[in-house]
Amino acid sequence: MRELSVIGVRVELPTNQPIVLLREVEGDRYLPIWIGAVEATAIAYEQQGVKPARPLTHDLLRDLLQALSAPLKAVEIVELKDSIFYADLLIGDSVRVSARPSDAIALALRVGAPVRCAEKVLDEAGIIIPDEQEDEVEKFREFLEQVRPEDFAS
């Protein structure tokens, strides 16, 4: 397993499909995952420190895990099958629950849990952005500083 950092979310054009972009903490590969608008909003809210008046589903899950004294230890993206990513929530010492990566990432951000990815998934879907395209990544970071969660609403 390789640890990833969450770079952020953006809308891929021309399809208007949101993606979450992750990057190896100790490596050069990026992992783009296409996600739903609701999950993109949940990730963007947390990254921007937006606190909704009422808890979102991921906030509820965080609060439920806390109330049950069942800490989320990590999120692991474990498989890529037929262009669909699969993830697990590692809860407490021995519980593993299957989850969509987008939901798992939104929850991990809320509790400060690490996001990891299986080497075989990174080998298959990870991309290396050449130095000349690093400028694009910087533009993406600037975009993330200006985007609002409402931009992902359908």
Image (tube, helix red, strand yellow):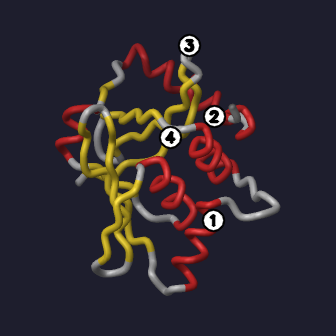
Please state the total of marks drawn on the protein image.
4
Q: Are marks 4 and 2 in contact (CB under 8 Å)?
A: yes
Q: CA distance from mark 2 to mark 3?
A: 18 Å
Query: According to the image, label 3 marks what residue?
Result: 14
Tell me if 42 is positioned left or right of 3 in this view: right
Instruction: Specify which label sits upstream in the sequence, 1 or 3.
Output: 3
Residue 32 lies in what quarter of the image?
Answer: top left
* Amino acid type, label 4: Ile
Name the element at disc 4.
Answer: strand
* Amino acid type, label 3: Pro
* Amino acid type, label 2: Leu
* Amino acid type, label 1: Asp
Residue 144 lies in what quarter of the image?
Answer: top right
Instruction: Specify which label sits upstream in the sequence, 2 or 3.
Output: 3
Q: CA distance from mark 4 to mark 1?
A: 20 Å
Name the element at disc 2.
Answer: helix
Query: According to the image, label 4 marks what residue?
Result: 7
Nearest the viewer among 14 and 128 is 14
Instruction: Specify which label sits upstream in the sequence, 4 or 3.
Output: 4
* Numbered circle sitting on residue 144: 2
Nearest the viewer among 52 and 37 is 37
Q: Are marks 1 and 2 in contact (CB under 8 Å)?
A: no
